[in-house]
């Protein structure tokens, strides 16, 4: 029988050493437990050899139980980082190195033993450290869940454990703020003329700052008067997709058509639609930091305190609701794919939502009278 069994030096458990198709494998677990005798190691070696002869040998089947969570998290990162967006890779790397790996480093729990109780203890630990409910939720139900799903797909674990529910994290929703369109206009007009076009683009089209920053001149079709949204940013890096990873056709607002006609391109050789003279980026590209600073400075001039996202996208969306747009119409204008997104961005009155839905019901016709024969 090819292969050998050995006792671990300085320990009371045994392991199997096996060579197969150019690789050496070591297995020290049998049915989820350390092999405490030579007899168990020989029995495992016999099973492995049987699988090889039947052509069904899978090393993962026998390595179960010897994957400490901390070590597996690092392996998962190294294998998947290149597939993620820069922002996702950076966020997951931070969660693993700052929170998950230190927590599990000295734990004897292996990845196959992760159960609901393990996840609940981790949740309490993160909250006790002072992390917000939203951050703890992202670490556990975002990062760690993604890792365990990969382990399940790779047959390292047999099933996914149940994860804590969102309400278990006591996430406090931040109140949404908005301003009137008159105040919005006064803020934009308070900015230097160089920066007004990009601020108007954000306000009129209710899009993300990363999409305005990355918008190319070639993305605008003046004949059809539409923008093709196909570029974005992730972790401050330009990427060839927006957040939703689709190509979105955005009608150009009538007011923006005239702004683009009047806009002078200070840097004609730059590929970007909007450029900033003070930017250090190639092509004088805006950055989120520059946009936020421009918006804050303009807000100070008019005595208003609101962030760029709420002051542009959310405020314009709210104005549509205030004008009597239904949730469905608002969703269409926003370019959203679900009603939950509309409710997130707009302060809709539940009574009005019910009224709008009730008015869409087709009245039932009077029942037909049976004809008399």
Image (cartoon, grey):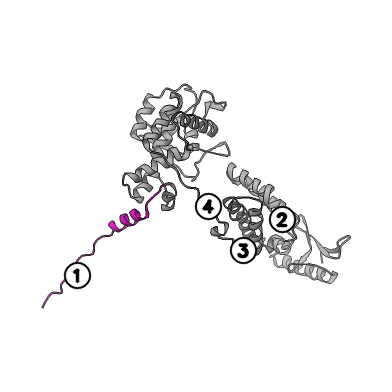
Pointer 3: residues within 10 angstroms few (<14), some, or many (20+)? some
Residue closer to the observer: 129 or 1? 129
Magenta range is 346-373
Q: Circle 4 is placed at which residue position? A: 172
Relative height, residue 364 to residue 266 (above, below): below
**x, y percentage for residue 57?**
71, 64
Q: Earlier in the sequence, mark 1 or mark 2?
A: 2
- Residue sitting at x 57%, y 59%: 168
Residue 104 badge: 2
Residue 24 is a magenta residue: no
> Can the viewer see residue 75?
no
Instruction: Report which quarter residue 91 is drawn in.
Output: top right
Residue 370 is a magenta residue: yes
Residue closer to the observer: 30 or 101? 101
Distance from label 4 to label 2 (Cα)?
27 Å
**x, y percentage for residue 206?**
42, 40
**SS class of the residue under badge 4?**
loop
Report the mark closest to the observer, 2 or 3: 2
Pointer 4: residues within 10 angstroms few (<14), some, or many (20+)? few
Q: Circle 3 is placed at which residue position? A: 161
**x, y percentage for residue 303?**
45, 32
Distance from label 1 to label 2 (Cα)?
69 Å
Instruction: Report which quarter residue 110 is drawn in.
Output: bottom right
- Residue sitting at x 31%, y 47%: 324
Distance from label 3 to label 1 (Cα)?
54 Å
Residue 259 falls left or right of residue 66: left
**SS class of the residue under badge 1?**
loop
- Which image quarter holds the C terminus? bottom left
Relative height, residue 293 to residue 25 (above, below): above
- Which image quarter holds the N terminus? bottom right
């Amino acid at each position: 029988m090819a292969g050998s069994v050995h006792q671990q030096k300085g320990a009371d458990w045994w392991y199997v050493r096996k060579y197969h198709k150019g690789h050496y494998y070591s297995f020290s677990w049998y049915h989820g437990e350390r092999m405490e005798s030579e007899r168990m190691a020989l029995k495992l070696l016999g099973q492995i050899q049987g699988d090889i002869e039947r052509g069904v040998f899978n090393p993962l089947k026998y390595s179960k139980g010897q994957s400490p969570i901390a070590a597996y998290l690092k392996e998962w990162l190294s294998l998947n980082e290149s597939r993620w967006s820069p922002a996702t890779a950076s966020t997951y790397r931070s969660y693993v190195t700052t929170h998950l790996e230190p927590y599990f480093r000295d734990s004897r729990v292996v990845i196959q033993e992760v159960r609901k109780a393990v996840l609940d203890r981790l949740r309490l630990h993160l909250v006790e450290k002072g992390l917000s409910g939203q951050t703890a939720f992202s670490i556990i139900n975002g990062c760690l869940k993604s890792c365990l799903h990969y382990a399940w797909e790779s047959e390292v674990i047999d099933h996914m454990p149940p994860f804590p529910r969102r309400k278990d994290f006591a996430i406090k929703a931040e109140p949404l703020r908005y301003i009137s369109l008159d105040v919005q206009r006064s803020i934009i007009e308070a900015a230097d003329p160089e920066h007004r076009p990009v601020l108007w683009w954000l306000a009129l089209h209710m899009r993300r700052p990363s999409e305005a920053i990355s918008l190319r001149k070639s993305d605008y079709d003046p004949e059809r008067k539409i923008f093709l949204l196909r570029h974005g940013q992730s972790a401050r890096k330009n990427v060839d997709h927006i957040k939703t990873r689709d190509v979105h056709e955005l009608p150009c607002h009538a007011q923006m058509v005239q702004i683009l006609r009047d806009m002078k391109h200070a840097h004609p050789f730059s590929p970007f639609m909007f450029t900033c003279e003070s930017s250090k980026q190639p092509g004088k590209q805006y950055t989120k930091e520059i946009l936020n600073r421009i918006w804050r400075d303009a807000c100070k001039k008019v005595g208003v305190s609101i962030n760029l996202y709420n002051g542009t996208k959310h405020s314009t969306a709210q104005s549509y609701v205030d004008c009597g747009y239904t949730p469905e119409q608002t969703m269409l204008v926003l370019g959203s794919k679900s009603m939950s997104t509309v409710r997130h961005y707009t302060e809709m009155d539940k009574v009005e939502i019910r009224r709008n839905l009730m008015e869409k019901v087709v009245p039932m016709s009077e029942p037909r009278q049976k004809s008399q024969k």
